[in-house]
Image (cartoon, helix red, strand yellow):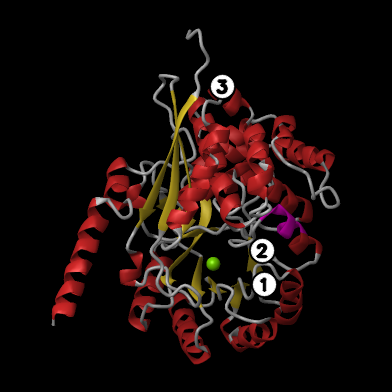
Amino acid sequence: MSPTPARITAVDTYDIRFPTSRELDGSDAMNPDPDYSAAYVVLRTDAGDGHEGHGFTFTIGRGNDVQVAAIDALRPHVLGRDVEELCADPGVVSRDLIGDSQLRWLGPEKGLMHMAIGAVVNAVWDLAAKRARKPLWQFLADAEPEWLVSQIDFRYLTDALTPGEALGLLRRGREGSHERAADLLRRGFPAYTTSPGWLGYDDEKLTRLAAQAVADGFTQIKLKVGADLADDVRRCRVARSVVGPGVRMAVDANQRWDVDEAITWTQALAEFDPYWIEEPTSPDDVLGHAAIRKAVAPVKVATGEHVQNRIVFKQLLQAGAIDVLQIDAARVGGVNENLAILLLAAKFGMPVCPHAGGVGLCELVQHLSMFDYVALSGTTEDRVIEYVDHLHEHFLEPVVIREGHYQAPTAPGFSAAMRPESIAEYTYPGGAFWAADLAQREHAQQKGTAA
Ligand SMILES: [Mg+2]
C-alpha cells in the first residue's frame, strides 16, 4: 500500500473537431453545417493503477476552443485532489465547481461554464466507476439510495422534490433491480434512430436510410423539420410511406419556431402521425411549450437537449409543458445533476428519452437510461434513447446496437474514452487532419489571390 494518498496530477484538455459538415451529417433547421466537436478533458493520477477519468462536452465547431478554456478555468479545483476521496464522493467536487463564486457569475448554472463543469464531473464519475470495476450504469444501480441522494444538489428543487421523496423513489426503484439488470444485459435498452432524417439529405437518401432503419429493428425514427413547410410535408410523406403506420416517427424543429408558428406547422404535419415534436421553440420558454402542448395534442411535445439545468426541467414538469423529457449527458452539470433530473422525471411520471448523437453522447447517456430502468423508473415503456450512427469508431468502447436496442456496456467506466490516435488526428488546429486541411485552404487562397 502506498504511504501517501494518490492525487490528481493533471487535468489535460483537448479541442477535438470532426469535419462532419462536409457530408451534411447532423444538419437541421438551425444548425446547417455542424462540425461535431468535443471539448475533452482527461484526469490523470499517480495511483499507478492505469486509470484515468475521461469527460467531454459536445459542441458543433467554432467555439470549441472557448469551451476548452472554460474547462481550463476549473483546473485549480481538481488538481491535487485525493483520488480516493474524490471518487468516494463526486458530489463534493460538483458542489465546489458550481460554487466557485467568481465563475458562477458567468452562469449561474447555465451555458459554457456549466457545460465545462459537466465535462469535469463526468470525468470524475468515469474514474470512480473504473476504480470500482463497473460500468457506470451498474455503479449507480448498485449504490445505496442514501448515498445517491447525498450526490444531489436539492437547492431550488424542494418545492417539487425533497430529499425524502427522492430517497423513497430510489428505495422503490431498487425492488426487482436484479431481475431488471439481468433483462437489460439480455435485451438491451430500446433505441430510435435519427440517421435517416437530417435536413440536408435528399429524398433518395431519406428513403434508403428509413427502410434500413426498419430492417435494422428500430421501431422509431426521427426527421428534422422546420426550414420549409412544403419540403417537410413531402419528406414526412416519403418517410411515412417507407416505414408504414406501425413505426413511430418523431419530428424535430431544433428551436426554429415562435409559439404560434410551432402550433400551425405541427398541425400541418399531423396527417403523418408524428409521435412527438421536439424542440418546437426556445428551450427557455416554459410557458411557450405548455401552450404548444395544449394545442398540438395528441402529438407529444419533447425537449431537453438544450435545457440548461435542473431548475428549468423542474418548471417544464410543473407547468405541464412536455410529454417527453430529453436529458443530455453533457449539457448540464454532469451525472449529479442528471440524477436530480431523472428523479424529477420519476416523481412526475415522465418518460425520459435522452438526446444523443453528436460526438460520444450515445456512449455517455446510455448509462443514465440504463440506471434509470434498473434502479429508478423500473420500466422501458415509451422510453427510447436516440441513436445516430456517427463517429463511434473514435471511442475505445463504442456503443453496440442490436435489433434496435443499445446493448448494456460491461467495460468499467462511462464509455467516455476516445482513441488516442483519433485525438491526435482531429485535435484542432494542430492535429494531422486539420494541419493538412488548413494548409490546403491557405494554398488555395494564395492561388486565388495570385489569380
Ligand atoms: Mg434534437
Type of amino acid at the residue the image marks with label 3 = Glu
**Disc 3 to disc 2, how far (Cα)?**
38 Å
Looking at the rendering, the stretch of residues picked out in magenta corresponds to: 309-314
Type of amino acid at the residue the image marks with label 2 = Val
Q: Which mark is residue 324?
A: 2
Q: Quadrant location of ligand 1?
A: bottom right
> Residue 275: where, in percent of width, then height?
60, 73
> Residue 295: where, in percent of width, then height?
74, 82
Q: Which residue is mark 3?
A: 84
The front one of 158 and 107 is 107
Q: Earlier in the sequence, mark 1 or mark 3?
A: 3
Mark 3 is surrounded, within 10 Å at the Cα level, by few (under 14), some (14 to 19) or many (20 or more) other residues, namely: some
The front one of 117 and 365 is 117
**Disc 1 to disc 3, how far (Cα)?**
45 Å
Residue found at the far right of this picture: 159
> Residue 29: where, in percent of width, then height?
49, 78
Q: Earlier in the sequence, mark 3 or mark 2?
A: 3
Q: Which residue is mark 1?
A: 300
Q: Is residue 312 magenta?
A: yes
